[in-house]
Amino acid sequence: MAEYFDRIAGRYDEWYRTETGRYVDRTEKWLVFSMLKSRGGRALDLGCGTGNYTLELRRRGFDVIGLDASEGMLAVARSKGLNCIKGDAYSLPFPDGSFDLVLSVTMFEFIHEPERVVAEINRVLKPGGEVLIGTMNGRSAWFLFKRLKSLFVETAYRYARFYTPRELEDLLRNAGFRDVQSAGVIFFPSFWPFHALAEALDKKLYDRCKGIAAFIAVRGVKP
């Protein structure tokens, strides 16, 4: 998978500057940062990609480091002046209790043993530390369309494993996290042109209709 992301790193980063990309980014970040309780401290952006959330965490006052397996993605992230390193999510290169927050957005779709990664997240978090995992939901209208498209054109969705909110919650609870909660946003397919309407509905339905949201997030706290 790292080789695939090496090839698309520039295109991936540019997508966030499209109209749809700006809407998705703005809406997902609204959800992520409304769920998080942490307001500072040491943070790990796990699967940082081109540094989108690494940069946002730094803007919000966190001492943040990004980690990713793709050199192509990391090159783009470092060009933004971010502290990002190459590493393996199955064996994080940090001592126990290193972080107040671990954030991982759209990485878990591309790993084969999520339980091992969650165990590593637990290890590197301080007691009382917070984790938030954001992934794509294969039951949404957005990703049903994208999955169909990937049958004909190579996209990341061809290689992704999708989760439901309940599966993400179980993943954290089984690893010992407490105060686990989930939510979701993005309820229309990617070609939906009325972003203002979509964004208004996102902020009303994020909790009640999370099962059909394109982007779902789960948060938990290490005891």
Image: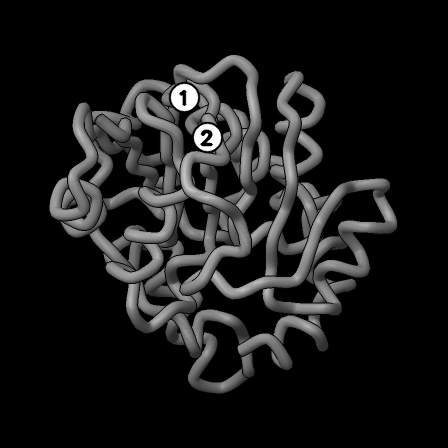
State whether residue 12 appears in this view: yes
Q: Is mark 2 on a helix, strand or loop?
A: strand
Q: Which residue is drawn at 60% across and 59% down?
A: 68
Q: Which residue is farthest bottom?
A: 152
Q: Which disc, if any, is residue 94? A: none
Q: In this view, does 102 lie above or below 105?
A: above
Q: Name the residue under label 1.
A: 36
Q: Where is residue 215 in the image (x, y as percent from the top left)?
A: 38, 44
Q: What is the distance, in whole Å, between disc 1 and disc 2 at their CAs?
A: 9 Å
Amino acid type of the residue that numbered disc 1 sits on in the rendered structure: Leu
Q: Residue at x 29, y 69 (%)?
A: 113
User: Given contact means CB atoms under 8 Å apart, are the residues at marks 1 and 2 in contact?
Assistant: yes
Name the residue nearer the viewer: 134 or 146: 134
Amino acid type of the residue that numbered disc 2 sits on in the rendered structure: Leu
Q: Is residue 21 above or below residue 221?
A: below
Q: In this view, does 58 lie to the left or right of 173?
A: right
State whether residue 215 appears in this view: no
Q: Name the residue under label 2.
A: 101
Q: Is mark 1 on a helix, strand or loop?
A: loop
Q: Quadrant of the C terminus?
A: top left
